[in-house]
Amino acid sequence: MHKSIWDISQEWWKTVTLKVKNAIVFMDSNMAELLHWSGGIEHLLSADVVDIKEFSSFEAAGESYKKGVFIVSSALTDVTSEILCDIISHSHFQYVLIFTTTSPLLHSSSGDSDSDTVFEEMEEKVLEWLGNMNYTVEITHIPMFAAEVCPGMFITPTFSKLFPIMASDVKQIVYQYRSSHHLKDTKQIERLKDIEFIHLPNSLQKQIKMFASGLHAMLQCLDVREDVYSIGHMSHLVATELDVYPPARARRKSVQNRASLVLIDRTLDVASAVTYQVDSLLDKMMNTLSQLPGHSSDRTVNLQCLSHVCSSSLPVLLPGSLAPTHCLAQPTHLIPLVMKKQKEAIMDVNRKLVETASAEKLPLNLAGRPGRVTAEQIESTVTLFKGKYSLIKKHLDLLQTSLATSQCMKHPSAGQHDMMVMTEKNLMQTIADNDESAPSAAAILSKLMLQEMQKSRTDDKALTLDDMLCLITYMYSIMEESDEDENEETLLREKFIEWILQESENLSPLVKQIVGEKVTDSIVTDQIENVWQRLEDIRTVRDELQHFRSVLDPGDAMTPASVKSLLRLVIEKIVDPAKPDLPDIECKSGGFKDLLKSGFGFFKSSGKPRPGDSPLLILFVIGGLTASEVKQIRDVIDKAKPSFEVLIGSTRLSSISSCLESIFISDNVNTFDQ
């Protein structure tokens, strides 16, 4: 039995907390989010830190504080080095400890830095900043990487911005590569699969290497040697780097326990990330509640009803969240939100809340219809804890989850979500039927857009521009090239441009980031052309796959069309007792023995390695994961009862807005330029 991701993260943080007593701690935002999901600030407060500050050039420590601890997620070079210098130079430290999640091997462009030398040189530099070579400086690599959302599901907050490159990025990548290397057109690079690791900008190369290093650190803590599999081009690049990473190669030679690691690009199935047809309550929260400031994977929960703070003074009250608030035991409060259907999850949350209130002898009022839970019922029970701060602290995870549930249920967007679900189902059935005599999916959206544009008052509109972009993205993700109607799609694009110009004074943040501050006909037309290039990427990204080319199940006379997530299709193939070939899953074998096993069958009786051959299967999505996808995987596993255990991870918890931003706004090629 391997360690849980929770246990691993606690061991990492314990290593840090042993060193922070009486220190001022400076932490970058990535590490703060990792700490947030690993039990929170209690780790540091219980270790007697003096203060916790942002890792910023605008921060420093007072003259009386002599010990500084820095926890950063980047190499100690470039901007990170400058910030360290600024803070240390404006403080009065005599003892400095620096924890970095970046391996010494990755502190130079050559990747061959000696572990001792690279940190010793940096320690000398820090001593110069301190102004006294007799002071003490310690630099330690601590490979913090993953945080558990609930048992069997984890995220990697320090890599939340890592997102697969797409076909329309190729031209930019090639231009930057040839410009930086002063090359003329030597080798023709036109398709995404022609892009090799060396073609990527240095910052993205470094991030992929750091990510591969983090995967290695996690696998080392799990005490396994892995066979690495990939689906998608970014996953292929990461798998290759993990395969050749020297510490990973050394680990695979010395460890006996086996694991299968399957890396999957988010862009291969965008539909499952932008749909409103969600199975889990956590997804509904991710798409309804506002994002917790400074975080990529958590949501804001209003805790006002637990305090005596009046609504006019609400800014003084820190928001609640979904992450665990203590580090004493493995948290389980999000299990029903992920693993159960929405109605079952709501019932489960309410039951636990009522049981807790009863156990604490609070005056319960159980009025209401049996078998039906309302937001008002949940809030009424939560209010029983108001002002009882010892009880609030004791049960904070449950209370935050309960309030998140009630606030999600009461959210005014519920009717809008129903409209989106209905439209998605209409699009699915239209594409599945492929009836030339009926309106196409693009025509349906054009008509819907025209109806909304004709409504003069914003309050009368059932859908927004953001909603329409979401529906268009969903449509392209489930379509195949043969489904296209070029004239209808051109009309759809023109209508979308027209609607943006009509709403130019009241654009949402998402659309404003796409088109820019200055809204003119020519600018909007150019920017929406770029959007349509990305949409075309989404439609064609699975063209070369065989088993996983389509996520649309057309149904039959008795069953309506539906979308099956790519992750569900993958796990169904893996657990299939017939063990079919998996031509879409590329294997990077973990050693010479596996090369013999996969390439020269006469050396060994067993065939080509496949995911599921090992006692542990790790599915990891680069670019974001929804709770509904996790639930679907668990449902398949529970039914098939395979002989292996499954861990499911991703760079972040995905929401509709975060996925759209990653596709249409973020520069995923140069995101990591400092």
Image (tube, rainbow, N blue to C red):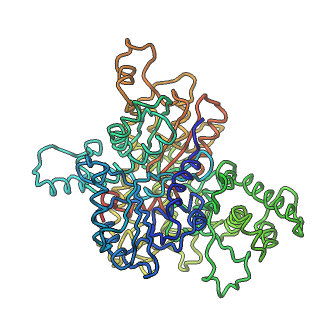
Residue appearing at x 36%, y 78% in the figure: 517
Decide if residue 18 is on the left or right side of residue 100.
Answer: right
**Nearer-the-camera pick, 585 or 326:** 326
- Give the image quarter of residue 301: bottom right
**Nearer-the-camera pick, 596 or 656:** 596
Count the numbered circles shown: 0
Decide if residue 254 is on the left or right side of residue 372.
Answer: left
Residue appearing at x 79%, y 71% in the figure: 385
x and y percentages locating residue 589 in the rendered image: 38, 30
Q: Residue furthest front?
A: 134
**Nearer-the-camera pick, 378 or 81:** 81
Q: Is residue 478 visible?
A: yes
**Nearer-the-camera pick, 482 or 167:** 167
- Give the image quarter of residue 187: top left
Q: Is residue 249 above or below residue 132?
A: above
User: Looking at the figure, which quarter contains the C terminus?
Assistant: bottom left
Q: Is residue 440 visible?
A: no
x and y percentages locating residue 366 in the rendered image: 89, 64
x and y percentages locating residue 192 in the rendered image: 29, 45
Q: Is residue 321 above or below residue 542?
A: below
User: Looking at the figure, which quarter contains the N terminus?
Assistant: top right
